[in-house]
């Protein structure tokens, strides 16, 4: 009896066998075959037949000579494997000669496939690395940042509010766009080196001025890395340094600056309008809601949720065709405040009386949060004082 596995077109790595590596069992091994002091017997053979195409190394047993020499990168002579990253390992050491290390596709591998191959056929071996390729797909859109028109086009498709796409479909789409527009690799962004924006900034600073320390470059990065939507005023370097040295004056300036507060309010309103307009372009959103529309589509409420950032409430319906329909309504919160301040008049449910209760309307979710915070804070202070105002 022999053991054979289907070839999925994996790319194999010449790296050493270490914990966490993806491996494939080499096909063509027979029952009772020997590997030095190890042989494939009936029970081992049955376990091997049940293994999936791709496995992961869970632990290794290093060569004795390397142990004596205290070599850090010891090549394993035996390994223990598990069927998946989270599965339990098999209680059996197997010789490395029976396996090949499979290369896990990284960002550069995807880029090579996009640029260097005219075929749109997706590598079959990559279908085993869904999580890794999903991560790559989230960052790959950066290749278009040097081409604003293409960036907008691919962003509208791949970052749709409701539609989600598999990594494979995204890669094929990017490849098609690049081919149709005759874009060369040298024209696009390809510097995926795993560095953070902060590390890239520090490296550039030190290239421009070798005398800069890492601390100097880090301080410069912190001074300039302010969120755009929280700072609508442009200031000079002198003013920036002044604010940095005198943080208290900066805080007081912002608090007392009515123009700044008004500018932030206007900006937030514009951002909310932009987001709402994007959603309402979707034909699943109802532009208006009345009894006639409810009867015509036979709408049934499925769910309601608060969209805090948009100060809105999203109502989800199911129509007569069993499709989801949405309606976006402005956030409104009504509550009543009693003119009686004593606990004895407010510690139980009472009927609403216009002579006693005043009705309030809140249209901003942040205002409601502040009210709740102040009420809880007042209650805690009241209780800590033993119930005495």
Image: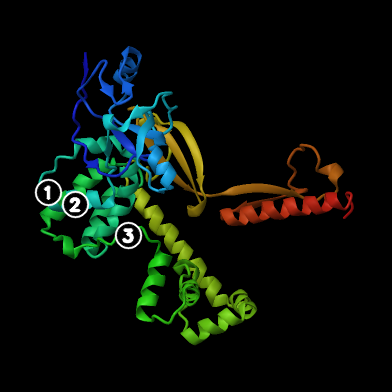
Q: CA distance from mark 2 to mark 1?
A: 8 Å
Please tell me which residue lies in front, 62 or 156.
Answer: 62
Q: Is residue 370 above or below residue 9?
A: below
Marks 2 and 3, Cα distance to the nearest angstrom? 15 Å
Q: Determine whether 256 is above or below 289 in the image.
A: below
Q: Find disc 1 in the rendering and name its residue.
A: 117
Name the residue: 40% across, 24% down.
92
The disc label shown at residue 193, or none: 3
Q: Is residue 363 visible?
A: no
Provide the secondary structure element on which disc 3 rests.
Answer: loop
Q: Horizontal and vertical percent for residue 63?
A: 38, 38
| Separation of residues labelled 3 and 1 (CA atoms) | 22 Å
Quadrant showing the C terminus: bottom right
**Residue 163, disc:** none
Q: Is residue 102 visible?
A: yes
Looking at the picture, the colour scheme in use is rainbow
Q: Quadrant of residue 293?
A: top left
For the residues labelled 3 and 1, say whether their Cβ atoms are less than 8 Å apart: no
Task: Label 1: state its secondary structure.
Answer: loop
Report the residue marked by disc 2. 112
> Which numbered disc, 2 or 3, marks the residue that appears first in the sequence?
2
Mark 2 crowd level (few <14, some 14–19, many ≥20, 10 Å Cα): few
Instruction: Indicate which label's residue lies in the foreground, 3 or 1.
Output: 3
- Give the vertical position of 183 relative to 264 (above or below): above
Q: Nearer the viewer, residue 136 or 357?
A: 136
Q: Secondary structure at mark 2?
A: helix
Q: Nearer the viewer, residue 271 or 112?
A: 112
Q: Is residue 46 left or right of residue 330?
A: left
| Label pair 2/1, CB-CB below 8 angstroms | yes
Sooner in the amino-acid sequence: mark 2 or mark 1? 2
């Amino acid at each position: 009896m022999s053991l054979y596995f289907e070839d999925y077109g994996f790319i194999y790595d010449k790296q050493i066998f270490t914990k966490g590596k993806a491996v494939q069992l080499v096909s063509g091994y027979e029952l009772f075959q020997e590997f030095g002091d190890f042989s494939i017997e009936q029970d081992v053979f049955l376990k091997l037949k049940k293994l999936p195409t791709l496995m992961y190394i869970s632990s290794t047993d290093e060569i004795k000579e390397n142990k004596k020499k205290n070599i850090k990168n010891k090549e394993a002579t035996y390994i223990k494997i598990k069927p998946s990253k989270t599965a339990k390992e098999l209680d059996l050491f197997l010789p490395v000669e029976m396996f090949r290390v499979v290369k896990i596709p990284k960002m550069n591998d995807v880029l090579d496939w996009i640029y260097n191959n005219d075929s749109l056929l997706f590598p079959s071996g990559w279908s085993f690395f869904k999580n890794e390729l999903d991560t790559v797909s989230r960052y790959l859109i950066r290749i278009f940042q040097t081409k604003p028109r293409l960036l907008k086009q691919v962003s509208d498709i791949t970052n749709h509010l409701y539609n989600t796409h598999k990594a494979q479909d995204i890669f094929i789409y990017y490849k098609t766009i690049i081919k149709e527009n005759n874009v060369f690799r040298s024209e696009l962004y390809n510097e995926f080196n795993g560095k953070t924006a902060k590390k890239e900034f520090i490296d550039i600073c030190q290239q421009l001025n070798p005398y800069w320390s890492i601390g100097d470059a880090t301080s410069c990065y912190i001074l300039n890395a302010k969120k755009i939507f929280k700072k609508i005023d442009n200031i000079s370097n002198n003013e920036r340094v002044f604010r940095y040295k005198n943080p208290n004056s900066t805080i007081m300036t912002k608090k007392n600056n009515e123009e700044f507060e008004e500018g932030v309010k206007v900006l937030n309103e514009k951002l909310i309008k932009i987001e709402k307009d994007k959603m309402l372009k979707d034909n699943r959103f109802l532009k208006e809601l009345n009894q006639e529309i409810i009867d015509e589509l036979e709408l049934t409420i499925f769910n309601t949720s608060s969209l805090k950032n948009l100060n809105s409430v999203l109502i989800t319906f199911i129509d007569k065709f069993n499709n989801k329909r949405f309606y976006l309504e402005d956030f409104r919160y009504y509550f009543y405040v009693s003119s009686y301040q004593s606990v004895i008049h407010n510690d139980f449910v009472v009927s609403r009386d216009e002579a006693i209760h005043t009705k309030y309307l809140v249209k901003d979710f942040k205002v409601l949060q502040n009210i709740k915070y102040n009420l809880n804070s007042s209650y805690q202070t009241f209780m800590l004082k033993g119930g005495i105002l």
